[in-house]
Each structure stands twice: as C-alpha cells, then as structure tokens.
Image (cartoon, helix red, strand yellow):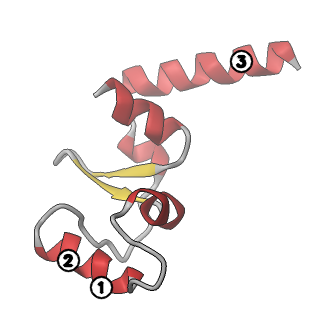
C-alpha cells in the first residue's frame, strides 16, 4: 500500500474508485511492461487487460475525489513543506 501511495503521489498511477484498481500512466507502462524493442505495446496492454491485471477507463477521474481524507491531509503537508523549502 505504501508503495502504491508513493507511485500515486508521483503521478505514475491513478486509483480508480474504491475497488483497489488503478490505471498506470502510459510512460510507466512502457517502462515497466514486458515489452521489448519491436514488440507491439498495444498488444501487451490488451493482454494485461484481458488477464485482469489492468483496467481501461475512458473518463479521467478527479484526483481529489479519489484521495482519502488522510491522504489529502498528507499531500497538503507535503506541499507546504515543499513551499517552505523553496
């Protein structure tokens, strides 16, 4: 959970609702997927979706609505810390 929270803060994944599922950003997918030079990225994505390891969403979720109250407070504290360091 901690690792997923960190990845979400970095913008690498987006949680989808309260189901525990998430969407991986395209750049992260390309980096981490089992795709080699010359392999079809789209085919690899479809395979992950077909196997239930990834989900497709058409509507961009509102990040604020996906964060729990605790996460929102944590994020606000981090932003304040970053502003104080600048």
Q: How far apart are marks 3 and 1 (CA)?
A: 42 Å
Relative to 84, is 17 above or below? below
x and y, in percent, of residue 36 in the image: 42, 73
Q: In which quarter of the image is the N terminus?
A: top left
x and y, in percent, of residue 19 in the image: 16, 48
Secondary structure, mark 3, is helix
Task: Please give the name of the residue rendered at 21% of the width and 70% of the height, measured from the top-left corner.
Answer: 48
Q: Residue 43 carries which label?
A: 1
Crowd around label 3: few <14 · some 14–19 · many ≥20 (10 Å): few
Q: In which quarter of the image is the C terminus?
A: top right
Q: Distance between the residues labelled 2 and 1?
A: 6 Å
Instruction: Tell me if 52 is positioned left or right of 48 in this view.
Output: left
Crowd around label 2: few <14 · some 14–19 · many ≥20 (10 Å): few
Determine whether label 2 and label 1 are within 8 Å by CB.
yes
Farthest front residue in view = 37
Relative to 83, is 49 above or below? below
Secondary structure, mark 1, is helix
Q: Residue 20 carries which label?
A: none
Determine whether label 2 and label 3 are within 8 Å by CB.
no
Farthest right residue in view = 86
Relative to 54, is 56 above or below? below
Instruction: Give residue 55's quadrant in the image.
Output: bottom left
Secondary structure, mark 2, is helix
Residue to which mark 2 is pinned: 47
Residue to which mark 3 is pinned: 80
Mark sitting earlier along the chain (2/3):
2
Instruction: Give residue 66's quadrant in the image.
Output: top left
Task: Please give the name of the residue rendered at 82% of the width and 13% of the height, measured from the top-left corner.
Answer: 84
Q: Distance between the residues labelled 2 and 3?
A: 41 Å
Task: Please give the name of the residue rendered at 47% of the width and 43% of the height, measured from the top-left corner.
Answer: 64
Can residue 4 be seen here? yes
């Amino acid at each position: 959970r901690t690792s997923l929270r960190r990845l979400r803060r970095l913008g690498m994944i987006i949680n989808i609702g309260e189901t525990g599922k998430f969407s991986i950003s395209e750049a992260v997918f390309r980096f981490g997927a089992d795709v080699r030079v010359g392999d079809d990225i789209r085919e690899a994505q479809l395979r992950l979706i077909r196997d239930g390891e990834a989900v497709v969403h058409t509507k961009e979720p509102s990040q604020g609505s996906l964060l729990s109250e605790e996460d929102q407070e944590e994020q606000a504290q981090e932003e304040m810390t970053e502003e104080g360091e600048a």
